[in-house]
Image (tube, rainbow, N blue to C red):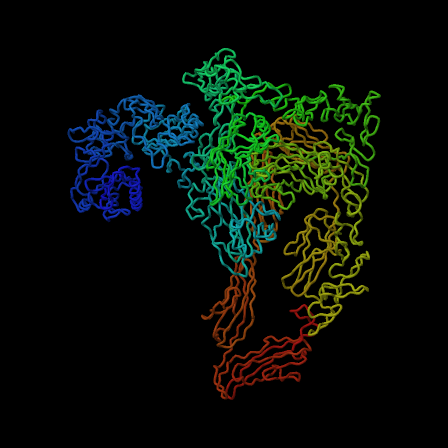
């Protein structure tokens, strides 16, 4: 405690002593905030509370309670406070150190003795003590303690004198010197918390601390250890004299007078102890509280009653709200079943219970008391109780029981929480598990702390992009712009070769947005087991023009369970590289989007329900493309594999009701409910044996039986009594009041009293007694006698005057109703009510029905708004608020008017039983400012049977207003203002069509709402409410029903005649039906084979006269028989003259017994209305028969991530959704679901079946389409009327509908089965479909659309079990498809129904149905074309075009002539590639042609001459320097074998290859171009591949070609070939029968087929082998295995295999292992992988991947090529599964460096700068270095550029002459190239004697390499630096210049060069006498005209000017 002086700033007022006063709270808040902020600066957790503000003389002190956890440094805590006080202010208050005190409770307050400087310092901080105040007790040692601490069984004085002479000696060893003087106790309060117990044995002998007790032997123990049931003193004295055990139960407390009272009764406002001690020290009412804490607040008027009155079965509130919903307690979350702790730890048990009133929670230990100890604390608040045990000891072990109590009962939580002490194994504490030396806390979603490492193995989810246009469910999302994605479909690409998802052509608009790749469903959901694992993927991006601006963003974002986590650790991502990313799933790698660090709990919560994984797309703001590939995510599996154990993943020991690795799921039979940590709690379905199912959301029981009700079926229904918690069917019995029969039961409710007998609690007026067995005062009669009802004794009715005044009352005592009236009432002017009974009778009485209520505004019932005329309806914008209120605010969107709430359907219809009852509702509204009030409008509008009634409320329209309307005629008036009669009201109630409540009360509204709508009605069963005495119960005549005879009875129908509602007349059905429609009179369910509105007709297939001949009137037509199998006509009639039947022959049947099909028809069947089906055959023939095909099925089986191509589309097919689905697995199969309908609006959507269900499906005629649909609709949606299935084809749409009584709010499911027969389909306009319509649709089926939307608001829709029957030519095991026609098609047609054109024919527009098939028109250059479009394929003879009507490029002519020579090659001017200077030409129409694309420099009709400015002769043939040769030139190869042609080229690279066929046909699609096109490889050559192949090669200068021939030889077929028909693998259950079919193709007619079993060869004894069919009956587990069918003839043998799986058989699953797992081989090397497998039976081995030679388990690649690189998979298979193992082959295309230098020789003068250039190629890229062959490089030498390898030597010297080597080096080796360098010595520059300027010594000649063509001219320029330039002299090395040589200044010109001009030319400079002559030289080469320039393909060169 601390005492601080506030005298200088606080003016004391008495109200400051009240802790609830505003002045106290103001001071307290300011002081606490300031001091706690100071205490936050030191270690530990300090709490500050203001205890008291008091006045001591003139001083004002504030007493503080300073608590501390985790900081035992008392001096530090005191110094902080003293320092703040000494500074002079706390918050805005001035403080003083005068009178400052700081001490522990019970600490003696004496001046300190100063022994040191530190003591002196402390002494200055603590002033002299003051005398104890008036509210304090002075201890014998002078210390002060609060008076309430006196005699509280807790010593607080240092000498413990506060516990002496208290009337009971408790601690006889509590020390203190000498005797003490007793001080009388004043008050007692519960003890406050004390310090926790230190570990270890009792402290040694010596003086004990304040918080310790002294044992009798002098030891010290913590005071909390006293009387806690365990001996802590070595002499056991801490457990002496602990008093006698309490006489009260653990759920009771002991009153001061010794009585026991339930803890529930503490502070409830009742004096239960009789000394009022249970109502002392109770919490008081706070500011703003309506009632005190011990009081209950009534709902309606907010009055206060004692809380003990709640649920005492006596209503005390005016609105009975104190008795609403009363239920005994139910424990929803019992304590944790088992807690293991170590000694000294803190343990907490929690318990949650619900009930009304809110239960309190008490605890028991081992069914007894929990010892009173400062270590143990218990709390109970709002139904949540906790028991906390600090410093756990052995005595604390045991079973702790949670007990929940309220006024309705008590219940114990099951199971108990068992506490046991353990020793911690290992180094990790409890609640942790060890991972590689680290201790990780058990998360377990807060359910348990018992966990360990999982035994599961790591597994992986893999995703690769291998198929074009298949994005595998990966999407690109834009969180900031969800509406319009900035990428088009052309920018989203799949590159199967790189296996990448690429985003290309990226714009700035895309880069500035946040965008992500989002992973598909298989990566989402519950991924708890990914913890500790990783997500790996590869990403690559490219930049624009080398620019870069890196972008910092998180690599991955996770969302789930309301959290968004970002990956904060990422490595740099360089461009143009494949970056391998690894994202670790551990908390230290993640942070919240706010930047806050992620805890393990955060990450586990997110992984428990992963909603999205988003991968970053933008890495640089100058990106132009980015690619994602090879996604791998770690999970776990229980199956053994090659991966390690998932040691980082916890596996928790979950309590009952929980499952999953981390207890994240609820077990079967348990449901998730709110409350509890993290995900909530799993509650069992506790229905006390009266129900079998619970609501999955609320957990409340559904469909309570045995007359029970309530959330746990824990209450008896009204009218029954008993204890439903016993769990027996007879728990609730009818109320005996005094009898159980309804007519003799005078109380609708009763309850089980304390004596286990019933007490009736709602006796009707006039009855009294516990069982309503007596008449009340003022009543006479004997209720125990038959008809012994109590009659009223009217004291005032003593004369006939009163009877005269009341017209409907008679009797001597005016106590009876006249005949035709009922219900005598005092307030009725007529005494009794007149019987109405819809005018059909006058006999009635008060009904025996009970009142009930219709309620509105709950469960999302659909409301709407309407104007008063009901002409404008508003449904949008209406919202639900709370559980019973609907609200509308969007008044700005609708016209101004008076609007009404339109009540839902539950308030309409037959409501005659509402008469005499009430309508009650609450309306709230908020008008806008300055709006006008609308008056004189009805508050309620009622309409029914053409009668309009209005009610005007007498209550002024205030908000909120609760309105009550009585259903009596006096409360209503007609809409025309006339009074309402009883007849009016009952007629309107008999069929209420409009029921509206006023919503607007001003002309400008902000908001209106309606709530708590209740309408009284009456029901025939007991509800616990009063009888509906004002409801008439009429004695209806025959044919009428209902309380007011308002309904027709069964077997009767309404007619228009008669009073009020009309007359009920008997149904007229000729004796063939017992019921008819109540309104129309149409007969329902006609019997005796009859039909029609009056059952007046016979059904099809029957004949007779139902109107006269009785039940046997309709007899089956004998055509010729009457059974369905031989009745071939369903039409006949009875000839009344001949008295026998006449067969009405069916249209397509003939013969005397209707047993034959007519010509042009087929398949005689009773299912056909015409007997036989008409041949359709697309109208091209009338000859057909039933097909020989067999039925088969097309079906789809969904798997996670594999949606089988299904999509959702709208009606117009403009919106298609192919992602966002989930695949739900169940024991019944898999279903595909979609639940994002909120994004689709209210537009109907349909399931679009994939491609397997489309195309040519004429063979589905007569087959079935099956599927299962389930859906969940929203509550506010309206039903959509639509077709169930649509089929679309050939521009025809047909629809089918099936009746389905659907609901909404819960999951609806139904299986559909539709037959493809015309009678089951209709056109969209409702007209019936014909056979022709259906066949046309099936001939080219574009779409099958299955309905997905059933309401305008959908929550989810699912489809499953989709299958469609087709027909196949081979035996399938199913029935023959007899309904499918097999037509005899004319030559141009083919297909079962002639629906296809034959090869060589194409479809034209004329003719019936699909059109005619006519010959392909290809101008004689092709005999094949597209069967529908007619576009020619494989044009020959160098032609092209849709009709082969054009010559191919490079050819000309007229292809329409129809000869092979139509197109001739273009000669431009020659046809060989080296001399063809235009790739194209065009015909001139006269047999000539013109080249159309002459190369630059060429011109003329045939490019035969050079253009202006060019010289040469293009007509001369020049031999190409590019040599091309194809090997082998001719190859003979067998059909099916591979063949490779290689195109060998000589000449400098690069080379470009093009393969073609000489006859113009395309190269086969199966051909593979290898080695950059150098090789053409055909894997399996076919006869059509025979021919000449041309390899055309082009380099940068030339083009050439070469040819080779492939000859395919037809290999004779195998002598015998065995085939096992599908399915070759079958999985059957034990006891089933299985068959395998084996067939053979044999060159010899004599062959045998024999089945054996692999291994021992012996078949099971239940097997039969007959003609290749193996049948095994009663299959057993040991039959599983591989079976061989061996076929043999006189030439050879062959065999096939079949596999039989039998689930449950003993087995060993296969396991495959590949070594090595990674192999790197040089190109051309030998690669080999070995696969070893284990399993039983021995698994088969299958290699998956690229080509290689596989023998058993060895895969060999003799000569590795680059394309062989990649992944190879070994699959092991046996009868019990499969397993794969992967290996990767890396092909190294390494090569030695190839070094090139320039120039190869250098002459240079001293002082100049030398530059040498070097390049190198090779793989890997080589590095470049320079060296000198002899000696060292010059010290001045440097590398200027590393990419080219430039060597730079400035100011070169003659010593630098020599051979320089450029060396290229890589991992393969090194190579070099040399340059010879000559450095010429020279003089230094000197002054010109003429001009005096300097002249450089450098002389150069340009060009340095001179080459000129013969006949051309050449200029040589000699450059000599200097100013002015000196004179030069030219000469030849061989002599003088020739006559054709001209010297022009420093230039030498050679005219008309000839070979004689070749040689070296020298330029000389002479500066004057005595100076050396400088010179430079150049070599000139003159080439002959016939030679070709190496640098140009053109013969025409530009002319020099």
Which residue lies most toward the top here? 785
Q: Position of residue 244 (x, y in %)?
A: 27, 22
Q: Position of residue 1045 (x, y in %)?
A: 61, 22
Q: Quadrant of the C terminus?
A: bottom right
Q: Is residue 209 visible?
A: no
Q: Is residue 1414 visible?
A: yes
Q: Nearer the viewer, residue 221 or 25?
A: 25
Q: Position of residue 317 (x, y in %)?
A: 41, 27
Please identify the quarter of the rendering in which residue 1226 is found: top right
Which residue lies most toward the front here? 801
Q: Quadrant of the N terminus?
A: top left
Q: Nearer the viewer, residue 1937 or 750?
A: 750
Q: Is residue 1342 above or below residue 1512?
A: above
**In this picture, residue 733 sits left or right of residue 1703:** left
How many marks are shown on the rendered structure?
Answer: 0
Please identify the quarter of the rendering in which residue 1573 is found: bottom right
**In this picture, residue 211 sits left or right of residue 845:** left
Q: Nearer the viewer, residue 1655 or 1633?
A: 1633
Q: Nearer the viewer, residue 798 or 1245?
A: 798
Q: Position of residue 1912 (x, y in %)?
A: 67, 77
């Amino acid at each position: 405690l601390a005492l601080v002086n506030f005298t200088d700033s606080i003016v004391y007022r008495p109200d400051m002593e009240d802790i609830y006063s505003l002045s106290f709270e103001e001071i307290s808040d300011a002081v606490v905030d300031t001091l706690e902020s100071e205490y936050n600066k030191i270690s530990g957790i300090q709490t500050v509370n203001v205890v008291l503000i008091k006045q001591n003389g003139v001083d004002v002190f504030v007493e503080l309670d300073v608590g501390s956890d985790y900081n035992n440094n008392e001096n530090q805590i005191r110094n902080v406070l003293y320092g703040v006080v000494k500074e002079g202010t706390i918050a805005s208050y001035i403080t003083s150190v005068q009178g400052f005190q700081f001490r522990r409770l019970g600490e003696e307050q004496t001046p300190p003795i100063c022994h040191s400087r530190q003591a002196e310092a402390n002494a200055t901080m603590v002033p002299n003590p003051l005398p104890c105040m008036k509210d304090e007790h002075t201890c014998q040692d002078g210390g002060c303690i609060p008076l309430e601490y006196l005699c509280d069984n807790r010593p607080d004085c240092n000498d413990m004198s506060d516990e002496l002479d208290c009337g009971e000696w408790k601690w006889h060893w509590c020390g203190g010197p000498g005797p003490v003087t007793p001080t009388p106790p004043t008050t007692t309060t519960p003890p406050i918390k004390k310090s926790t117990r230190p570990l270890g044995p009792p402290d040694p002998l010596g003086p004990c601390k304040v918080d310790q007790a002294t044992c009798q032997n002098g030891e010290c123990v913590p005071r909390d250890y006293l009387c806690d049931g365990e001996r802590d003193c070595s002499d056991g004295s801490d457990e002496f004299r602990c008093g006698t055990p309490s006489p009260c139960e653990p759920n009771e407390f002991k009153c001061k007078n010794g009585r026991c009272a339930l803890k529930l009764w503490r502070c409830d406002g009742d004096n239960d102890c009789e000394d009022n001690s249970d109502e002392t020290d109770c919490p008081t009412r706070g500011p703003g509280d309506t009632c005190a804490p011990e009081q209950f607040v009534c709902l309606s008027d907010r009055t206060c009653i004692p809380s003990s009155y709640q649920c005492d079965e006596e209503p005390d509130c005016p609105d009975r709200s104190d008795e609403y919903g009363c239920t005994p307690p139910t424990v929803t979350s019992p304590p944790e079943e088992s807690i293991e702790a170590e000694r000294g730890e803190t343990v907490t048990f929690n318990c949650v219970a619900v009930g009304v009133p809110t239960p309190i929670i008490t605890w028991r230990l081992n069914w007894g008391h929990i010892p009173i100890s400062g270590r143990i604390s218990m709390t109970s608040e709002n139904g949540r109780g906790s028991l906390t045990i600090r410093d756990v000891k052995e005595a604390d072990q045991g079973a702790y029981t949670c007990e929940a109590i309220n006024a309705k009962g008590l219940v114990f939580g099951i199971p108990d929480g068992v506490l046991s002490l353990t020793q911690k194994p290992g180094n990790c504490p409890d609640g942790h598990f060890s991972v590689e030396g680290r201790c990780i806390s058990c998360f377990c979603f807060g359910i348990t702390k018992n966990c360990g490492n999982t035994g599961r193995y790591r597994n992986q989810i893999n995703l690769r992009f291998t198929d074009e246009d298949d994005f595998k469910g990966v999407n690109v999302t834009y969180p900031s712009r969800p509406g319009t994605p900035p990428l088009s479909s052309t920018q989203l690409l799949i590159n199967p070769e790189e296996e990448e998802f690429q985003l290309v052509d990226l714009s700035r608009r895309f880069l500035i947005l946040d965008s992500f790749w989002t992973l598909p469903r298989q990566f989402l959901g519950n991924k708890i087991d990914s913890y500790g694992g990783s997500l790996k993927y590869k990403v690559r991006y490219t930049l624009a023009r080398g620019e870069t601006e890196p972008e910092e963003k998180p690599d991955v974002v996770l969302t789930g369970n309301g959290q968004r986590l970002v990956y904060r650790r990422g490595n740099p991502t360089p461009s143009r590289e494949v970056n391998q990313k690894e994202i670790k799933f551990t908390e230290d790698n993640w942070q919240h989007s706010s930047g806050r660090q992620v805890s393990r709990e955060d990450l586990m919560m997110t992984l428990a329900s992963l909603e999205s994984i988003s991968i970053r797309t933008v890495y640089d703001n100058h990106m132009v493309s980015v690619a994602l590939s090879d996604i791998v995510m770690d999970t776990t599996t229980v199956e053994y594999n090659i991966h390690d154990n998932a040691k980082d993943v916890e596996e928790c020991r979950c309590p009952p009701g929980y499952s999953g690795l981390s207890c994240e799921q609820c077990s079967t039979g348990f449901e998730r409910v709110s409350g509890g940590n993290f995900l909530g709690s799993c509650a069992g379905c506790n229905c006390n044996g009266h129900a079998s199912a619970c609501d999955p959301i609320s957990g409340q029981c559904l469909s309570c039986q045995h007359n029970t009700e309530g959330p746990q079926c824990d209450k008896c229904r009204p009218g029954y009594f008993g204890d439903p918690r016993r769990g027996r069917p007879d728990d609730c019995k009818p109320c005996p009041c005094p009898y159980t029969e309804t007519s003799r039961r005078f109380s609708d409710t009763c309850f089980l009293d304390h004596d286990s007998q019933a007490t009736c609690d709602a006796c009707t007026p006039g009855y009294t007694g516990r069982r309503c067995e007596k008449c009340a005062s003022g009543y006479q009669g004997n209720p125990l006698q038959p008809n012994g009802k109590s009659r009223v004794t009217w004291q005032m009715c003593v004369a006939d005057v009163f009877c005269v005044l009341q017209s409907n009352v008679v009797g001597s005592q005016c106590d009876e109703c006249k005949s035709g009236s009922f219900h005598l009432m005092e307030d009725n002017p007529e005494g009794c009510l007149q019987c109405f009974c819809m005018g059909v009778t006058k006999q009635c009485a008060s009904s025996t029905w009970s009142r009930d209520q219709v309620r509105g505004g709950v469960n999302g019932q659909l409301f709407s708004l309407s104007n008063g005329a009901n002409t404008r309806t508003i449904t949008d914008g209406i919202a639900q608020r709370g559980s019973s209120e609907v609200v509308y605010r969007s008044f700005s969107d609708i016209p101004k008017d008076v609007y009404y709430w339109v009540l839902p359907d539950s308030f309409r219809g037959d409501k005659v039983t509402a008469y005499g009852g009430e309508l009650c509702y609450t309306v709230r509204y908020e008008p806008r400012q300055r709006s006008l009030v609308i008056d004189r409008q009805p508050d309620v509008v009622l309409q029914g049977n053409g009668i309009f009634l209005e009610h005007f409320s007498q209550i002024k329209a205030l908000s909120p207003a609760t309105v009550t309307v009585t259903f009596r005629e006096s409360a209503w008036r007609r809409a025309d203002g006339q009074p309402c009669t009883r007849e009016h009201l009952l007629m309107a109630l008999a069929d209420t069509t409009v029921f509206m409540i006023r919503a607007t009360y001003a002309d400008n509204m902000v908001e209106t709402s309606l709530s708590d709508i209740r309408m009284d009605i009456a029901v025939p069963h007991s509800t616990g409410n009063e009888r509906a005495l004002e409801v008439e119960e009429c004695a209806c005549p025959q044919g009428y029903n209902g309380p007011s005879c308002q309904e027709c009875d069964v077997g009767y129908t309404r007619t228009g005649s008669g009073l009020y509602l009309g007359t009920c007349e008997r149904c007229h059905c000729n004796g063939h039906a017992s019921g008819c429609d109540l309104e129309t009179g149409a007969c329902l369910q006609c019997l005796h084979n009859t039909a029609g509105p009056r059952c007046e007709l016979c059904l099809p297939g029957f004949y007779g006269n139902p109107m006269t001949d009785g039940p046997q009137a309709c007899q089956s037509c004998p055509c010729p028989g009457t059974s369905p199998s031989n009745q071939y006509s369903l039409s006949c009639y009875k000839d009344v003259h001949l008295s026998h039947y006449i067969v009405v022959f069916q249209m397509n049947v003939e013969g005397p017994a209707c047993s034959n099909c007519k010509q042009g028809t087929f398949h005689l069947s009773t299912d056909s209305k015409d007997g036989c089906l008409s041949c359709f055959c697309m109208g091209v023939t009338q000859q057909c028969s039933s097909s020989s095909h067999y039925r088969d099925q097309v079906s789809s089986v969904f798997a996670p991530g594999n949606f089988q191509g299904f999509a959702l589309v709208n009606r117009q097919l403009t919106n298609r959704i192919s992602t966002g689905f989930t695949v739900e697995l169940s024991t019944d199969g898999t279903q595909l679901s979609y639940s994002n309908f909120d994004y689709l609006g209210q537009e109907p959507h349909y399931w679009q079946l994939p491609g397997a269900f489309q195309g040519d499906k004429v063979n589905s005629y007569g087959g079935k389409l099956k599927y299962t649909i389930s859906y969940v609709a929203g509550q506010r949606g309206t039903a959509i009327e639509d077709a169930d299935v649509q089929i679309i084809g050939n521009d025809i749409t047909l629809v089918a509908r099936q009746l389905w009584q659907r609901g909404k709010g819960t999951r609806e499911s139904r299986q559909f089965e539709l037959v493809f027969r015309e009678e089951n389909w209709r056109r969209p306009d409702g007209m019936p479909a014909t056979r022709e319509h259906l066949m046309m649709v099936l001939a080219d089926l574009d779409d099958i659309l299955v309905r997905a939307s059933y309401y305008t608001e959908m929550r989810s829709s699912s489809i499953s079990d989709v299958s469609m029957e087709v027909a196949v030519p081979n035996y399938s095991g199913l029935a023959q498809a007899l309904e499918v026609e097999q037509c005899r098609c004319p030559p141009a047609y083919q297909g079962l129904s002639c629906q296809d054109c034959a090869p060589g024919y194409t479809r034209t527009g004329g003719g019936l149905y699909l059109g005619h098939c006519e010959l392909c028109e290809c101008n004689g250059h092709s005999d094949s074309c597209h069967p529908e479009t007619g576009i020619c394929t494989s044009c020959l003879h160098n032609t092209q075009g849709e009709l082969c009507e054009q010559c191919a490029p490079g050819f000309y002519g007229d292809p329409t002539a129809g000869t092979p020579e139509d197109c001739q090659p273009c000669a431009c001017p020659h046809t060989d590639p080296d001399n063809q200077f235009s790739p194209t030409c065009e015909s001139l129409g006269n047999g000539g042609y013109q080249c159309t694309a002459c190369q630059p420099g060429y011109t003329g009709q045939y490019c035969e001459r050079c253009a202006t400015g060019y010289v040469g002769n293009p007509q001369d043939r020049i031999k190409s320097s590019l040599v091309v040769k194809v090997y082998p030139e001719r190859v003979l190869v067998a059909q099916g074998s591979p063949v490779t042609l290689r195109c060998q080229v000589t000449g400098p690279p690069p080379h470009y290859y093009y393969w073609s066929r000489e006859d113009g046909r395309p190269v086969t699609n199966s051909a593979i171009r290898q080695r950059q096109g150098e090789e053409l490889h055909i894997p399996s050559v076919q006869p059509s591949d025979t021919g000449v192949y041309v390899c055309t090669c082009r380099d940068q200068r030339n083009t050439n070609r070469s040819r080779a021939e492939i000859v395919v030889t037809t290999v004779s077929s195998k002598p015998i070939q065995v085939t096992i028909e599908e399915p070759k693998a079958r999985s059957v259950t034990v006891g089933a029968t299985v068959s395998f079919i084996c067939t053979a193709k044999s060159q010899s007619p004599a062959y045998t087929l024999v089945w054996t079993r692999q291994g021992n060869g012996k078949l099971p004894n239940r097997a039969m082998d007959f003609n290749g069919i193996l049948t095994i009956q009663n299959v057993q587990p040991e039959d599983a295995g591989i079976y061989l069918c061996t076929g043999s003839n006189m030439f050879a043998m062959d065999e096939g295999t079949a596999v039989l799986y039998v689930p449950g058989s003993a087995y060993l699953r296969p396991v495959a292992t590949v070594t090595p797992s990674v192999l790197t081989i040089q190109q051309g090397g030998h690669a080999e992988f070995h696969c070893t497998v284990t399993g039983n039976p021995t698994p088969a081995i299958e290699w998956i991947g690229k080509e290689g030679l596989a023998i058993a388990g060895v895969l060999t690649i003799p000569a590795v090529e680059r394309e062989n690189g990649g992944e190879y998979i070994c699959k092991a298979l046996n009868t019990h599964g499969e397993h794969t193992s992967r290996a990767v082959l890396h092909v190294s295309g390494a090569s030695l460096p190839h070094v090139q230098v320039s120039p190869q020789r250098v002459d240079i003068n001293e002082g100049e700068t030398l530059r040498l250039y070097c390049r190198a190629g090779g793989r890997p890229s080589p590095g470049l270095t320079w060296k000198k062959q002899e000696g060292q490089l010059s010290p001045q030498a440097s590398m200027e550029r590393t990419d080219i390898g430039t060597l730079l030597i400035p100011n070169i010297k003659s010593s630098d002459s020599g051979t320089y080597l450029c060396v290229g080096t890589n991992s393969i080796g090194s190579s070099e190239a040399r340059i010879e360098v000559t450095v010429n010595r020279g003089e230094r520059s000197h002054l010109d004697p003429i001009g005096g300027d300097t002249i450089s010594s450098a002389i150069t000649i340009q060009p340095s390499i001179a080459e000129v063509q013969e006949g051309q001219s050449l200029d040589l320029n000699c450059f000599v630096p200097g100013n002015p330039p000196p004179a030069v002299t030219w000469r030849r090395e061989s002599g003088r210049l020739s006559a054709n040589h001209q010297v022009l200044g420093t230039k030498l010109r050679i005219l008309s060069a000839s070979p004689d001009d070749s040689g070296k030319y020298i330029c000389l400079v002479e500066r004057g006498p005595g100076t050396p002559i400088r010179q430079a030289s150049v070599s000139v080469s003159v080439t002959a005209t016939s030679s070709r320039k190496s640098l140009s393909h053109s013969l025409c060169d530009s002319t020099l000017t």
